[in-house]
Amino acid sequence: MTRTFKGLAAAALLMLVVSSVQGAQLVREFRGSNNSTTPSFTVEAPWILDWRLDGDYDQLVALDVTLVEAKTGRHIGQVLHTKRKGNGVRLFNQGGTYQLRVSGSLARWTLKIQQLTPDEAKFYTPK
């Protein structure tokens, strides 16, 4: 291996490590297995809801998540409805102080609120 190639490989590895540290910043994480309203959290736009749903049954699980303005209790809208195990992300382009109302059926759920930079949001792919 040439000295130049080793230097380039080391530089590429360093850039990869630095870019992963600068990724989405975790604001809050919520876990549960029943119906719940989360504590409030404050985010700036853009941000994502990174969700995961698991359960003991393949066909009987369900998860509904509604976004609520924390200060007024105003219903913003349903942000997730699923009847199967899995995971995904949802991008939001408006900041504020919110809560999530979670309704789960035979489910174990995890919801992560992550702050993004505008550049990171450009690479967002819904799933």
Image (cartoon, rainbow, N blue to C red):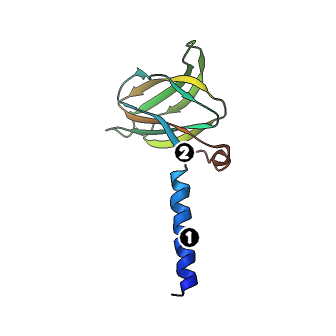
Where residue 67 sits: x, y (%)? 55, 24
Mark linked to residue 120: none
Q: Residue at x 54, y 45 (%)?
A: 24
SS under mark 2: loop
The residue wearing badge 2 is 24
Q: Is residue 92 above or below residue 97?
A: below
Q: Nearer the viewer, residue 16 or 101?
A: 16
Q: Residue at x 59, y 14 (%)?
A: 74
Q: Residue at x 52, y 42 (%)?
A: 25
Q: Nearer the viewer, residue 89 or 81?
A: 89
Where residue 34 sits: x, y (%)? 36, 25
**Nearer the observer, disc 2 or disc 1?**
1
Quadrant containing the C terminus is: top right
Instruction: From the viewer's perspective, tell me whether residue 109 is left or right of residue 5.
Output: left
Q: Kindly report the distance in space between the C-alpha atoms of the residues bearing marks 2 and 1.
A: 22 Å
The residue wearing badge 1 is 11
Q: State the image quarter where residue 79 is shown.
A: top right
Q: Is residue 73 above or below residue 103?
A: above
Instruction: Determine the residue located farthest toward the top in the rendered image.
Output: 72
Amino acid type at image mark 1: Ala
Where residue 76 sits: x, y (%)? 61, 21
Amino acid type at image mark 2: Ala
